[in-house]
Amino acid sequence: MLTPIILSGGVGSRLWPLSREHYPKQLLALVGNNTLLQNTVVRLEGLADKSAPLMVCNETHRFLVAEQLRSIGISPAHILLEPVGRNTAPAAAVAALTALSHDPEALLLVLPADHIIANAAAFCEAVTAGLPLAQANYLVTFGIVPNRPETGYGYINAVDAIEDTVALSVERFVEKPNLETAQQYIDSGNYYWNSGMFLFKASQYIKELEAFAPYIVGTCRIAVENALEDNDFLRLDEGAFKACPSDSIDYAVMENTHAAVVIPLDAGWNDVGTWSSLWEISEQDSDGNVILGDVQTEKVHNSYLRAEHRLLAAIGVDNLTIVETADAVLVAHKDQVQDIKQIVSRLKANERCEVELHPKVYRPWGNYETIDAEERFQVKRITVNPGASLSLQMHYHRSEHWVVVKGTARITRGDETFILTENQSTYIPLGVKHRLENMGKLPLEIIEVQSGSYLGEDDIVRFEDVYGRDTLNSSS
């Protein structure tokens, strides 16, 4: 049985300000209505004899991943939660060990959640062609047939064909080249872009890891053996997984093994690594512009312009990327968008919240959006999904005023429980236990005004929570 492994642990910092640490690019609908993660799962429909996908994601993204799968009617086999990011080799290892506990002969199709593949049929054909090779204990990767000298990708050098297959024997993996070297690779016809997609037996991958990176296997085995089931999630043992070295499948295994083969893939692949790559694959108007949202242009050419919240106007510019969000605006030359990581690093060093979160923050019960904030007060719009509730909680440093603007709320305040409807309000004093619930069939919206000496999200003490979050989790 083929088990798809979807790796959804990245942060996509080069697509800031749209992609944030707590809402990364794989969870965004960058092209079309589905998110990149959803499209990755939907793409698998063309494969026969496969099990439900096994997801590996960051713990902070767990409810977003679960909700996005639910909205497209997918029930995953497991959602493995990484307490910290440790790159693809450990992520695939914990997935392999989990799959082996259910099926000793499991085949794994390891896919990043943030790729675009225009021709899903060609992709499925390549995977199907690789199944006999994986069964024969080869480690299969998929090399993208290059159409230009790209300096942003690693390459796979492959020459000799594997008899009676479409695969080639891997000679070597090479790092991102300069432009002249990349052109030489293209001219030779023996090099392919490294896609980061793999197909192999779970048992064979673990065997190869034991040979070349035994400490990764050891720590991952403990992390899986001591994992805790939490509703729909499987929480890896935090101590063991944190002790695991961070390494990629390429470095840990593929560059060392003699069993690596590559299947050429020409299917409109793009890893959407930068705004310029997103411009390339998006529909352009007669001036070469990609325009999304409320945008007005005059004498603008070959640019990517995206407005999320406000009117964006551009005049007399060429080859720019302009992205507007609720709390940040990016303006960059298309040839310089790789340097966004420098801006993100600087923001992170300065502890700027724009790196981690958008003003609208999604939670398992709904979302909240910061409308205004000063030193001793903060105003939020809170939306609670039908049937959902916040935790029973209290705060040491702030009080809260709630005004219902849509729907009906059930309020717990101290020993009281009461109902509020539209245009009604209540006050939650500092230090009082409280809970907000939506018992109706429509979304509940309230305006919350916080006041106090400290308004951080970590000023929450939980007493009960239907989502299994503990009192140390800083999400309301």
Image (cartoon, helix red, strand yellow):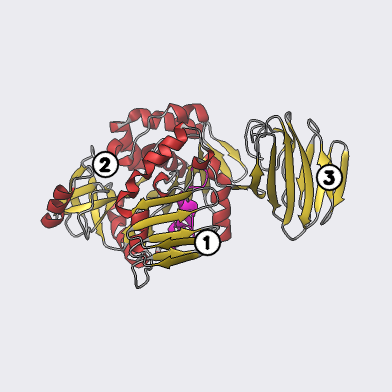
Question: Which type of secondary structure does the marked residue at label 2 adopt?
Answer: helix
Q: Is 267 positioned to the left or the right of 324 in the image?
A: left
Q: Nearer the viewer, residue 19 or 433?
A: 19
Q: Label 1 belongs to which residue?
A: 311
- Horizontal and vertical percent position of residue 368: 65, 48
User: Badge 3: how crowded within 10 Å, few (<14), some, or many (20+)?
Assistant: some
Magenta-tinted stretch: 21-43
Q: What number is the disc on residue 416?
A: none
User: Mark 2 — residue?
Assistant: 254
Q: Badge 2: few (under 14), some or many (20 or more) residues near its Cα, within 10 Å?
A: many
Q: Amino acid at mark 2?
A: Met
> Can residue 174 be seen by looking at this rendering?
yes
- The image position of residue 453, as x and y in percent, is 70, 29
Quarter of image, res 75: bottom right
Name the residue beneath numbered marker 3. Answer: 426
Q: Is residue 51 visible?
A: no
Q: Nearer the viewer, residue 383 or 203?
A: 383
Q: CA distance from mark 1 to mark 3?
A: 36 Å
Task: Identify which residue is drawn at 83% across, 48% down.
Answer: 425
* Residue 400, position as x, y percentages in the image: 76, 39
Quadrant of the image containing the C terminus: top right
